[in-house]
Image: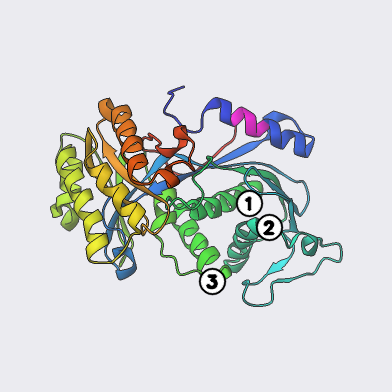
Amino acid sequence: MDPSFWPSQSELNEIREIVATMAGRCIEDVRVVASPYRICPLGAHIDHQGGTVSAMTINRGVLLGFIPSGDSQVVLRSGQFKGEVKFSVNEIVHPKDNIGVCKNDANDSSKLYEECDWGNYARGALYALQRKGSHLSQGIIGYLCGPEGLDSSGLSSSAAVGVAYLLALESANNLTISPKENIEYDRLIENEYLGLKNGILDQSAILLSSRGCLLCMNCKCFRIWRNGCSSLKCSTGGLSRTQGLEAWATGRLEDFGKLITASGLSSIQNYECGSEPLIQLYKILVNAPGVFGARFSGAGFRGCCIALVDAEHADEAASFVRREYQKIHPELASQWKQDKAVLICEAGDSARVILS
C-alpha cells in the first residue's frame, strides 16, 4: 500500500480489532468510515457571502469502526473522550435547544449517558436522517478515533465526525444517500440540531473531494468543479478565468502559492482574523524553505496554519518552522510534542465506507 494512503492497513487493523472485541464479532464483520479533514487554500470566509471557494481533503481524519448492532441500539466509544454513548434509533430526536430527546422506548438509557457530550454528533446524525424521512431499524456498535493533537485545529474535525456518523448509520441500514444529500444532512446536524452557524463548505469538501484535485464550489448556486493539477489548461466556464483555479490547473504551483499567501493576508487585514501567535506562525511559514504559500486554516483565532510546500523541501521546512516558532513562543512550543507540532500531509480523498 502507498505509504501516503490514508488510512493505513495498520490503522484499519487496529480499529477493527477494537470494534470486534466490543461487539463480540469477527474482525471481518467490521466496517470502517474514513472521514478526512479539509483545508481551504483560497476563498475562506466568502462562502458565507455566497462566494466561490476552493478546498481539498488531506490524508488525515476521523476513523469510525462499526458493526450493525442487530437491533435498534447505538453503542459508541471514543479514542479521545471518556465514557460510553448509548441510545436507540427508535428515539425521536429534537434539536438540543428544544426538549432534548423524546422517548418512545421504556428501556431507553440515553439519560444515563448525558455526561457524554461527545455523542451529540451521533444523535445529530439520527436527527438529520429522521428529519429527511429515513426509517432506521439498525443501530451500530462503534469506535471513533482521530489523529492526536488535531481536535479543534481548524481542519473541520466536527464536520468529519458528523459525516462519519451519517455514513455509518446509512451503511448499517442499507440506505442509498447521495453525497449532495449528505451535505444537507450534515448541515442539519450543525445548524438545526446543535444550533451552530456553519456553512456548507466543510462537509462539501469532505464528501466531494477527489485525491489530487482542487474542489471549487460556488456557494450561491452550489455548483461544483474538481480541477486536477496538470499541464492542461482548465476549462470550467466562468470560474476558469480566476487566477487561482487557472494556476492550479496548469501546474503553476508557485503562482498558486502566492495567491494562498495573499488570501491569508486578506483574512488578517480585511476580515480582522487571527490571533497574534497564529499570525506570527503564518509569517514564519511564508518564509520557510520550499514553501509556495501559506495561510490560516479556519479563522486563525486558534488551530493551525497550512502551507503548500515543495515535497523535496518538506522536512527542511518543518524543521525551520519548529526552530523559528520556538524562538518567538517558547512557552507555546513547549506544550507540543515535537513530532506533532508540524505535520507533513498530502492531498486526500473523499469520505467513504471501507468494507474489508
Q: Secondary structure at mark 2?
A: loop
Q: Secondary structure at mark 1?
A: helix
Q: Measured along the vertical axis of the image, is residue 113 above or below residue 30?
A: below
Q: Amino acid at mark 1?
A: Leu
- Which of the pair 58/262 is nearer the observer? 262
User: Quadrant location of residue 299?
Assistant: bottom left
The residue to which callout 2 is attached is: 136
* Location of residue 73 in the rendering, given as x and y in whole percent from the top left corner: 76, 53
User: Quadrant location of residue 265?
Assistant: bottom left
Numbered disc in front, either 3 or 1? 3
Whole-number angstrom distance, CA of label 3 to CA of label 1? 22 Å
Give the residue at the far bottom of this rendering. 98
> In this view of the protein, can residue 225 be seen by the observer?
no
* Location of residue 80 in the rendering, given as x and y in whole percent from the top left corner: 62, 45
Q: Amino acid at mark 3?
A: Gly
As drawn, is 80 to the left or to the right of 350?
right
Q: In terms of sequence position, does the residue under pointer 3 or pointer 1 come before the other?
A: 1
The residue to which callout 3 is attached is: 195
Q: In terms of sequence position, does the residue under pointer 2 or pointer 3 come before the other?
A: 2
Whole-number angstrom distance, CA of label 2 to CA of label 3? 24 Å
Numbered disc in front, either 2 or 3? 3
Q: Which residues are magenta?
A: 12-16
Q: In terms of sequence position, does the residue under pointer 1 or pointer 2 come before the other?
A: 2
- Residue at 57% of width from left, 30% of height from top? 11
The residue to which callout 1 is attached is: 169
- Quadrant of the snapshot with the C terminus: top right
